[in-house]
Image (cartoon, grey):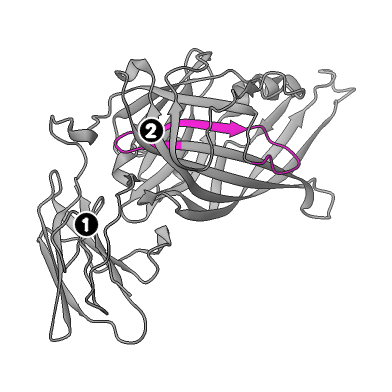
Amino acid sequence: MHSVVSGEFSLVRLCGRSRFLIAVLTALACGASTKAQVRVTLSDFFTKTNLYYRAYANKYDPSDTSGSTAFAVPAGLAGTEGPNQFWDFSKGPTNEVLRFDYLSPVGMPEAADFPDAKLVEQETLEGSGSAPVSLFFDAIPGVGRKVYGYYADLSSNPMFGLLGFALSPSTVFVPPIVDFPDPISYAAEWSTSMTYENDLTADLGGDPTGEDPGGGFSARQQITQQSSFKVDAYGTIVLPDELGGNFGEGLRIAEDVTIDVSYDLGLGDGLQHYETDYTRNYYWVMPGYGIVAQLNSVQSSSPPGTNVTRAVAFMRMFETNKKITTGGGGGGCTDPAPVNDMRIRVSNGSVLLTWSKADCATQYQVQYTDTPAEPTSWKPLGTATASLSWVGEKVPTGAGTRFYRIVSLK
């Protein structure tokens, strides 16, 4: 068995000089090298304030029960599972433009229910006049994007206004979820599960004289949402022309979602299950850009399967102020680069890790795991350090093997 010392984009091998270096604790043996696959890390996502991106999207009417306004997904758009895919997102629907701004929650009244959030993703439908939807999260190196919930004032939504409905705007996830772990590579799998509640009210009007008070009701809505993620494909992604005709290697992430809906109508019988819905989402991610495209199937009473033919949303990033530094583009960097020249040494039973300085990094976090296939299993070994070395642990005893990695931090 081998213990692996890794950075954001590379590994270290004690027994040979190559781009991939593997440090061996329990056996000293060199194995055959394999071709590197694309990896996407937390620093590729939007994790700093004052950044934004804009995305094209189709127009979908959520009050359309017939589904006629759903996007008809062209054959071959999503590709299939496996390697060597080709996704051309240079063209697609441009009916709507969504803007995503990344802000600090400090001073935002909406942030009161999300005290642990350090960042806000504010989604605005340009030209609609509707209130933005704010997603509250934290970016934790070695863990991923930890999401606490969202705030959505739907009072301006035509469907709710027409029916006289109102839904409490603050949605708190219990527990918070890590929707995109750090790092992400081909064949990785993870899952999330959370519950949230909202108060649903309806004012159906009445006689203003009071003789006929009209109808109305209030109910407590509870939703339990479970998601299974898998990075099921990789290949070449072509971006819209507005981004300079860029293309590069990327990953496809498939998400299968189960949504259980219950209501408490205040009749004394508590929460009662109402329905179970299913949906499948695809995300395409690239180094430097994060999520560049997204496809969300319509909800249905049975799992939609892998071939999504009708979607409520197909989004494609076409503009951003994020400085893209992948592919040797030069011009400095905005995010810490991976460390290089990682080595592991063992002397008198003690472990020493060393590495070279990474561009734009001011400190480094040493992490370990016993199960490297689990993206969320990495744990820090002490606080971050500005040093280029770490020592302080004895060689693990017993049958288990410990894996180490170094995460560059700003």
Left or right of 256, for residue 389: left
Q: Is residue 222 above or below residue 17?
A: above
Residue numbers of the magenta segment: 284-305
Q: Secondary structure at mark 1?
A: loop
- Does 299 appear in magenta? yes
Please give the residue where the numbered disc 2 appears in the rendered image.
236
Badge number at residue 404: none
Q: Position of residue 389 (x, y in %)?
A: 11, 65
Q: Position of residue 123 (x, y in %)?
A: 46, 28
Q: Secondary structure at mark 2?
A: strand
- Does 298 appear in magenta? yes
- The residue at 32%/19% (across/down) is 245
Which residue type does callout 1 highlight? Phe
Earlier sequence position, callout 1 versus callout 2: 1
Depth order, front residue of 51/182: 182
Please give the residue where the numbered disc 1 appears in the rendered image.
20
Q: Position of residue 55 (x, y in %)?
A: 43, 22
Which residue type does callout 2 highlight? Thr
